[in-house]
Each structure stands twice: as structure tokens, then as C-alpha cells.
Amino acid sequence: MRSRHLLLIFIPAFIVGAFGFLVQIIRYQPLIPKDIRQKTYDLNIPIYDDDPVLGNKRAPITIIAFEDLGCVPCRESMKVLNALIAEYPKKIKVIWKGLPITQFPTPSARAHAYAFCAHKEKKFSFFEQTFIENDASGEEESLREISQAIGLDEKNMTDCLASDVWSRYQEKTEALATSLNIQAVPALFIQNKQINPPHSVAAWAEFLNLSL
């Protein structure tokens, strides 16, 4: 009788619990429909004409890098990627997409505008490397000094900076980053999948099987 009494107590409780669990599954299933989950893994990241390409454009391995000139981890990432390209010039290229999110101590947006205009003169890599090597800030005077040091045309830079070409490109890049749900930079992608990037050339070489 005691066992029967216990069953009468626990069976309804089990049914209620199971029903509640089923309700939760039905409730949350529409939030992550199958087609959306598939798109998460089958991203299609567009390459824009104004995206700087570091390295040999014909290199078989493409890394897409969303980075900010103003953030320290991004600068370290860029140093490693530049060294990786130098080590494996025929195997690696980087598509660079700038996301100027830094606001303190100096906003990085102006530095990204200069970098974009330097790219228009086919000197993005010179600007980027000089900016990083000198631990430059986004202040106007510093950016002008870098422009002069790498030989950018003053009139072309003035016209480019005064136009809305950079802002339109930046809006497009930021919208893409939002669609990819990028939460922080640097954010690196290979074959349309975000990766946890290695922190050294040797680690990259192992990760990509570059020694084969």
C-alpha cells in the first residue's frame, strides 16, 4: 500500500515535470530555427573592392580580419599576421576590415580614415606597419606625420579625407560586422568561420599546416 501511495504522488509530479520540459522546448525552438543555425556555420563574408589586401592576392589561404588600429590586442594580432605573411608570402593573404571602436584615450576613427585613404594610394600596408611600429595615436598631428613619412600625396589625402567615401565604406563594414554578430576585435575568419587565432607565427603555421 505504501508503494502504491508513493507512486500516486510521484507519477503526477513526473507528468507535470515532463509537460513543463516539453513546453520549454516548444517555447524556445522558434528562437533558433534550423535555417538560421545553418547560416551561422555557412556564413558568406563579402569582400569589398575597398578592402585592403595584405600579402599576395593569389595566395591560397585567406584570412579575413576585423581589427581596430586603436586596440592593443589588434595591434599584436596585426604584427603576427604581418610576420606570418613575410614568412609564407606565397601561402597567406589577409583581407583587412577595419572596425574603429576605440574611444579612449583617443578615438581611432580618424586613423581608420587615414588608413582608408592610404589604401586608395596603394600604401595601406606601409601606413598600418608604420602606425603600429610607432605605437601611434589617432591624433591628427601623428597621422599627418605618418602620411608624410610614407610619402602619401597631400592633395589626394586632403580630398579623400574630405569626401564621404570612407564613411560610406565604414558603414557597410560595420553593418557586416553586426550581421556576423562580432562581439569584440580582433575577429578573424577562415573559410567563413570565426576562429580563435594563434598568437605566434609558429602556432599559425601549425594551425594552418603550412609546413606541409
Image: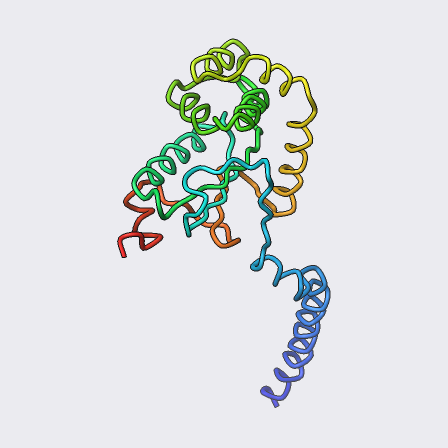
> Taking 179 as reference, is 139 above or below it?
above
Which residue does the image show at 51% across and 15% down from the upper left? 143
Total labels: the figure holds 0
Q: Where residue 162 sits in the image (x, y, percent)?
A: 67, 17
Q: Quadrant of the C terminus?
A: bottom left
Which residue does the image show at 67% across and 68% down from the upper left? 25
Q: Where residue 63 sits in the image (x, y, percent)?
A: 46, 46
Between residue 166 and residue 188, name the one nearer to us. Answer: 166
Q: Quadrant of the N terminus?
A: bottom right
The quadrant where residue 140 appears:
top right
Q: Where residue 153 sits in the image (x, y, percent)?
A: 53, 15
Between residue 103 and residue 174, name the one nearer to us. Answer: 174
Which residue does the image show at 66% across and 72% down from the upper left? 17
The colouring scheme, among rainbow, by chain, secondary structure or one colour, is: rainbow
- State left or right for residue 39 relative to residue 59: right
Which residue is outermost to the top?
141
The quadrant where residue 97 appears:
top right
- State left or right for residue 2 relative to residue 16: left
Between residue 183 and residue 96, name the one nearer to us. Answer: 96
- State left or right for residue 132 relative to residue 51: left
> Taking 202 as reference, is 44 above or below it?
below
Between residue 161 and residue 137, name the one nearer to us. Answer: 161
Q: Where residue 81 sits in the image (x, y, percent)?
A: 38, 38
> Taking 194 as reference, is 133 above or below it?
above
